[in-house]
Amino acid sequence: MAQHFLLSARARDLDIGEIHRLSDADARMRFRELAWPDTAGEPVCPSCGGLDHWTLVEGAKWKCQGCKLQFTATSGTCFKGRKLSYRQLLVCAAIFANGVNGVAACRMAREMMIAYKSAFVLLHKIRQIMGSDEDAARLGGVVEIDGAIFGGSMPRLPNTKALWADFFEKNKAAARKKRRLIVVMRERRGEDPDIPAKVRTFLLNKEGDAIEIARRIVMPETVIHADFSTQWEPLHLYFETKRINHSESYSKDGACTNHAESFFSRMRTAQRGVHKIMSGAHLSRYAMELGWREQYCRKSNGFQHGLIIGAVGRSKPSRTFLGYWRKRPANDDGDFFAQFAA
């Protein structure tokens, strides 16, 4: 039997203890090298992208010669205005990378000795850049598409069984309103195992809304696999489509959506074992994170750590999470989905 990737030595090349032992200057340089890999850690202006600068604080703060902006390694990113040190940010990213099914905010708060609100906002900022960092990626080859419902937990049952019928009648409608649909589009792995198969997730009202998204992000020659839901019928107009009837079998005549179901299995495992409840207000970000984890599931934790800090360096300040707590309503889904509006 083949060894699971997480049990192999290739999955482990990140030492959190070594990060803890870094000096302030070394931690700052490590962060710069991961955030600005194209320049080997040399400062890049977040406003104009210029490389010419004056040094204001050695290794920590610069002033762009082009636009005259004063900046640091986190200026203009989702970590703008951060209060954590560079070493703490690196450790947070390492803990996050090591959480195969995610990391709860309570755990991050305890391990980093920070407030729960700080951990909550930090984790959601990372989740958001995980999804947005893959925005430009188009899917091709063989793609599986499917949808699943999450959320909608019921309040605790009353003590007396005689009251259960009335309880369900009063609360089932409210629970149904909290349920949200996540649609996943996932490539199957190609011949080269070193190239990750892309995974894209979307928070939608119904599966049929994913048709227009598929037309924009899936290449025309792609073969799509879907189940027998009537919502997927229009796929036949635009792509070569194979369908699988799940009431009969999981796979038949080469058609299956097992890779998409694998992603939903990871999401339900994360909900059941890590987060307990995934709020509908933030469900899209949880889906982005777990889609990213599924995409890079056969990459080492050190590689994932570098991707996270690198994505921070390319990110923009969050419009949803400002400072260390929310400053606007939660049900906004961000600009990530606006590009797919009809």
Image (cartoon, rainbow, N blue to C red):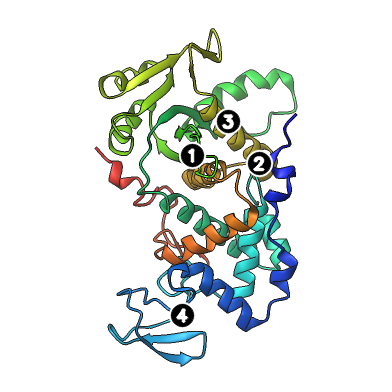
- The picture places residue 109, in percent across and down from the top left corner, at 68, 62
Above or below, 116 against 185 in this view is: below
- Residue 29 location in percent, x, y? 56, 78
Q: Secondary structure at mark 1?
A: loop
Between 152 and 341, the one nearer to me in the picture: 341
Graded by Cα atoms within 10 Å as few (under 14), some (14 to 19) or many (20 or more), the crowding at tag 4 reads: many
Task: Identify the mark nearer the N-term, 1 or 3.
Answer: 1
Using the rendered view, name the quadrant where residue 162 is placed. Answer: top right
Q: Position of residue 74 (x, y in %)?
A: 47, 73
The residue carrying mark 1 is 197
Q: Quadrant of the N terminus?
A: top right
Under mark 1, the amino acid is: Ala
Give residue 72's mark: 4
Q: Nearer the viewer, residue 329 or 266?
A: 266
Q: Earlier in the sequence, mark 4 or mark 1?
A: 4
Q: Amino acid at mark 2?
A: Lys
Residue at image location 42% in from the left, 28% down from the top: 142
Q: Secondary structure at mark 4?
A: loop
| Residue 267 position (above or below residue 78) | above
Q: Which residue is mark 3?
A: 262
Q: Nearer the viewer, mark 4 or mark 1?
A: 1
Q: CA distance from mark 4 to mark 1?
A: 34 Å
Disc 4 and disc 2: Cα gap in Å?
37 Å
Q: Quadrant of residue 225?
A: top left
**Is residue 85 something that shows in the picture?**
no
Q: Callout 3, which amino acid?
A: Ser
Indicate which disc, 4 or 2, sits on the residue closer to the N terminus.
4
Residue 135 location, x and y as percent?
37, 49
Front position among marks 1 and 2 = 1
Rounded to the nearest angstrom, the CA distance separating label 3 from label 4 is 40 Å
